[in-house]
Amino acid sequence: MSAAVCVGLPVEFAELLVHELRTTPAMQRMTAYLIGVRPTRMEDIADEMLAIMEQRDRWFEQKRSEEANAAITAFYNRPDRPDEDD
């Protein structure tokens, strides 16, 4: 949040960014954006926040899918599974 305030954003907007981004990696990406780009319009910052959130959500969904796939594979490969030949 301090990076957002340092580039001149209102404290309320900085708090909103923290609340919406929720994770440390997401906030680190936003901090890098704020320091590196130094955007002047709040709309640009909001667009970047949405892009970061979308990427974070896609990552979570991918991990959830991988876990589900691993569980179903383990189920199909369980040792007590009857043979299909019988």
Image (cartoon, rainbow, N blue to C red):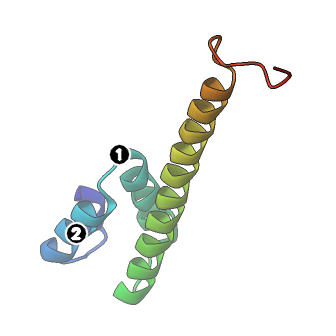
As drawn, the residue found furthest toward the right would be 85
- The residue nearer to you, when weighing 21 against 60, is 60
Answer with the quarter of the image where residue 5 lies.
bottom left
Q: Name the residue under label 1.
A: 24
Location of residue 25 in the rendering, given as x and y in whole percent from the top left corner: 42, 47
- Quarter containing the C terminus: top right
As drawn, the residue found furthest toward the left would be 12
Answer with the quarter of the image where residue 20 lies.
bottom left
At label 2, which amino acid type do we have?
A: Ala
Q: Is 26 located above or below residue 34 in the figure?
A: above
The answer to whether any part of residue 38 appears in the image is no
Task: Kindly identify the residue that appears in the image at 58 percent across and 50 percent down.
Answer: 62
- Label 2's element? helix
Location of residue 54 in the rendering, given as x and y in whole percent from the top left corner: 49, 67
The answer to whether any part of residue 2 appears in the image is yes
- Quarter containing the N terminus: bottom left
Q: Are marks 2 and 1 in contact (CB under 8 Å)?
A: no
At label 1, which amino acid type do we have?
A: Thr
Task: Kindly identify the residue that appears in the image at 48 percent across and 64 percent down.
Answer: 52
> Mark 2 or 1, which is nearer the eye?
1
As drawn, the residue found furthest toward the top would be 79
As drawn, the residue found furthest toward the front would be 86
- Label 1's element? helix
Please give the label number shown on residue 14: 2
Task: Kindly identify the residue that appears in the image at 62 percent across and 39 percent down.
Answer: 69
Location of residue 83 in the rendering, given as x and y in whole percent from the top left corner: 77, 19
- The residue nearer to you, when weighing 69 against 30, is 69
- The residue nearer to you, when weighing 2 against 63, is 63
